[in-house]
Image (spheres, rainbow, N blue to C red):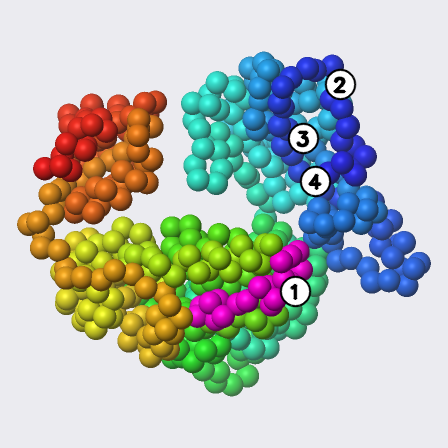
Amino acid sequence: IRTIAQIPLRLQGVEAEVIEVRGEVYMKRSAFERLNERQREKGEKTYVNPRNTAAGAVRQLDPAVTAQRPLSFYAYGLGEVRGWEVPGTHGAMLDAFIGMGLPVCAHRTVTRGAQGLVAFHEAMSRLRDSLDFDIDGIVYKVNSVALQRQLGFKTREPRWAVAHKYPAQEQMTRLNAIEIQVGRTGKLTPVAKLEPVFVGGTTVSNATLHNLFEMRRKGVRVGDTVIVRRAGDVIPEVVGRVPGPRPGYVPNFRMPATCPICGSTVVREKGGIDHRCSGGLFCAAQRKQALLHFASRRAMDIEGLGEKLVDQLVDGGLIRTLPELYTLGVAKLAALDRMADKSAQNLVSALEKSKKTTLARFLFALGIRHVGEATAKDLARHFGTLDRIMDAGVEQLLEVPDVGPVVAQSLHTFFQQPHNREVVEQLRAAGVHWEEGEPAPKASLALAGKTFVLTGTFPTLRREQAKEMLEAAGAKVAGSVSKKTDYVVAGEEAGSKLDKARELGIAVIDEAGMLALLAG
């Protein structure tokens, strides 16, 4: 980012401990054209569009390469701030950025009411083609910073901002074929193979058809002339077919019964729309995701096995299945990019350490669809051994607390696949083990049937430790307070969960009270 000339290396007229400014890196159309002209003069390949070129430049590991790309920047928000008083409105904050020497988009206004918003949207629509950069819409933001804080965030975006997009660009082309793409989670997606067409700043030859039901709704078949658009000016999709008679009978496309990658059974949950490969541990398309999940902290907890290393192991053909992880040696790992003898030895040690685990962790690590941590613990408590779980029928699985028809069918289907059972046996043969025993009688679990919610910081226990202790005693630990909650365990700095518990008249106890209940 320091290579972007617009961004000052020192902010002007402001002193603060921390100011985290957020914004967007982009490439102007004029700069993009000049870049491509230089590429042509050197006899090198040209770039397709400014957006992808800018994104690729930011991802470069070598700043010298980034510096050769003509990037620009607009500031539009704040992250962490310490030692600086944030202005009371979003508009004033953007003005403050300008005073610091940061670039801010000139095309902005403060307005009131729906009519003011629509008027700005229409005005920018008229200006859109004359701008020196690509846009696919505008964003409305609540101006008051106090109201922004009150409204807060959803998982991925703020409640105080909303995008208003422009209609996507569309073109007509021929649908030559339909192929199946298997995603990293096993979802099968039909993909349209198109006669190449230029739309939204790039040549499109593949476009998503989403799923079988969406394809049927749009009525598209091989050989049709179809309308293609880039949704959000990014993801190409088939909108529908151009009306008109077909030259002859063309059958409807059908989803395959087996995965085109690994041959495993393709399943669709009752009432669901997605078809999925059931060979999670075996399917090459799901290999990287399966490895990352297996190694995650709440699964096998293999420290040092991250995304970049998994990419190298899979792309280099060193790993094809989960059990092959335990065949990796120091010499093989040390030869990989960004690995040395010490880091290779650390990973081998972490792999060895991970072999001793619990049945619940191992079940969760297998990545069985719909089987999360809580369900894995319920299964381990109910059955006691992995073999009993693997051999259980749907009716037996439904006897487990909180296991419904969807989860039971998913588990049964998973363990009915011979290759999944083979992977489990290979992991056992590699030394992965845990303590097994008889299922605990429900009556012997002190807190069986009770639901707890944890909030705040406890004096001696970490939240995860408290959760494990409660679950070992048969309790369910939920993430939110409801009428079904029996106890809320509150520590220091307890938040809204404590307020909700008091509002609903639910018993509130501290760490000592929880330990007393556990002691019986």
Q: First in sequence: mark 3 or mark 2? A: 2
The crowding category of the residue bearing disc 1, from other C-alpha atoms within 10 Å (few below 14, some 14 to 19, many at least 20), is few
Amino acid type for the residue under numbered disc 4:
Val
As helix, strand or loop, the secondary structure at mark 1 comes to loop
Q: Nearer the viewer, residue 291 or 88?
A: 291
Q: First in sequence: mark 1 or mark 3? A: 3
For the residues labelled 1 and 2, say whether their Cβ atoms are less than 8 Å apart.
no
State the residue position of label 3. Answer: 75
State the residue position of label 1. Answer: 335
Residue at x 70%, y 30% (from the top left corner): 105
Q: First in sequence: mark 4 or mark 1? A: 4
State the residue position of label 2. Answer: 12
Residue 55 disc label: none
State the residue position of label 4. Answer: 25
Number of numbered markers: 4
Measuring from the top left, give residue 257's x and y in whole percent: 38, 79
- Of badges 3 and 2, nearer the viewer stands 2
Quarter of the view holding residue 322:
bottom left
Region rendered in magenta: 322-341
Measuring from the top left, give residue 303's x and y in whole percent: 48, 52
Query: In the rendered view of the protein, which quadrant contains the N terminus?
Result: top right
Does residue 54 belong to the magenta stretch? no
- C-alpha gap between disc 3 and disc 2: 15 Å
Residue at x 47%, y 56% (from the top left corner): 350
Quarter of the view holding residue 194:
bottom right
